[in-house]
Image (spheres, coloured by chain):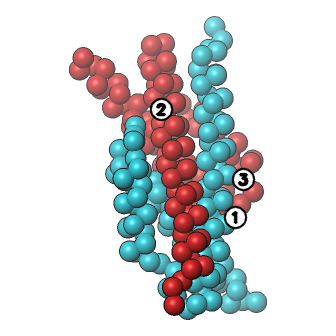
Chain colours: A cyan, B red
Amino acid sequence: MANIQIDELREKLDDINLQLLDLINERAELAKEIGRVKKAQGINRFDPVRERKMLDLLSEKNRGPFDTSTLQHIFKEIFKASLELQEDDHRKALLV
Amino acid sequence: MANIQIDELREKLDDINLQLLDLINERAELAKEIGRVKKAQGINRFDPVRERKMLDLLSEKNRGPFDTSTLQHIFKEIFKASLELQEDDHRKALLV
């Protein structure tokens, strides 16, 4: 039997994955821009207070089904990757 | 000096974070639904072939700035959390 029900749900899931992909990359572009502005102003790129505020806002707005600790874990991975991207950007700028 | 430029960029970033939050939770609801259908059909919830296909699609559609390995790392965290959510759901069902 072709599993039509699961196939349909999987199509929806692929669609959400691609929306997430676009949004995560859009976020990365913005983080790079923030990195450039901070660099121009001589501000340190990593700001733990700002990171805490972002996590608190996510915690406040979370309606589940993921619990807040799971979401914070996922977002910390996104933050870490963004910071690495800003650092790559900075290294490339130094090589020019 | 109030740092208006960074504040504006941060507002945009918060907005994207909240969109990501909604989308990740929407994805989690869908993954739970798939878990329920699979359970009803006696299919194993973890399907490495399907996971590979999702990662390949993301790799194919990725236009950066994140590189594919970074994105796959983030998505694997999301997949893992979704699977844990399906398992919680299953455990609760067993307790009813």
Q: Amino acid at mark 1?
A: Pro
Which of A95/B10 is in front? Answer: B10
Please report whichever mark, 3 or 2, sits nearer to the chain's N-terminal start.
2
Both labels 2 and 1 in a single chain: yes
Answer yes or no: is residue B3 visible: yes
Q: Quadrant of residue A11?
A: top right
- Classed neighbour count for the residue bearing mark 3: other residues with Cα under 10 Å, few (<14), some (14–19), many (≥20): some
Residue at 51 percent across and 25 percent down: it is: B34
Give me the C-alpha separation between circle 2 and circle 1: 28 Å
Give me the C-alpha separation between circle 1 and circle 3: 9 Å
Q: Is residue A29 left or right of residue A54?
A: right
Q: Is residue A33 left or right of residue B31?
A: right
Which of A58/B43 is in front? Answer: A58
Q: Answer above or below: position of A37 versus B62.
A: below
Answer yes or no: is residue B44 visible: no
In this rendering, which labeled residue sits more in front, label 2 or label 1? 2
Query: Where residue B33 sits: x, y (%)?
Result: 48, 24
Residue at 65 percent across and 36 percent down: it is: A14
Both labels 3 and 2 in a single chain: yes
Q: Amino acid at mark 2?
A: Glu
Give me the C-alpha separation between circle 3 and circle 2: 24 Å
- Classed neighbour count for the residue bearing mark 2: other residues with Cα under 10 Å, few (<14), some (14–19), many (≥20): some
Q: Amino acid at mark 3?
A: Asn
Which residue was labeled with disc 1?
Answer: B65
Q: Is residue A39 left or right of residue A67?
A: right
Question: Is there CB contact under 8 Å for labels 3 and 2?
Answer: no
Which residue was labeled with disc 2?
Answer: B29
Which residue was labeled with disc 3?
Answer: B62
What numbered label is drawn on residue B49? none
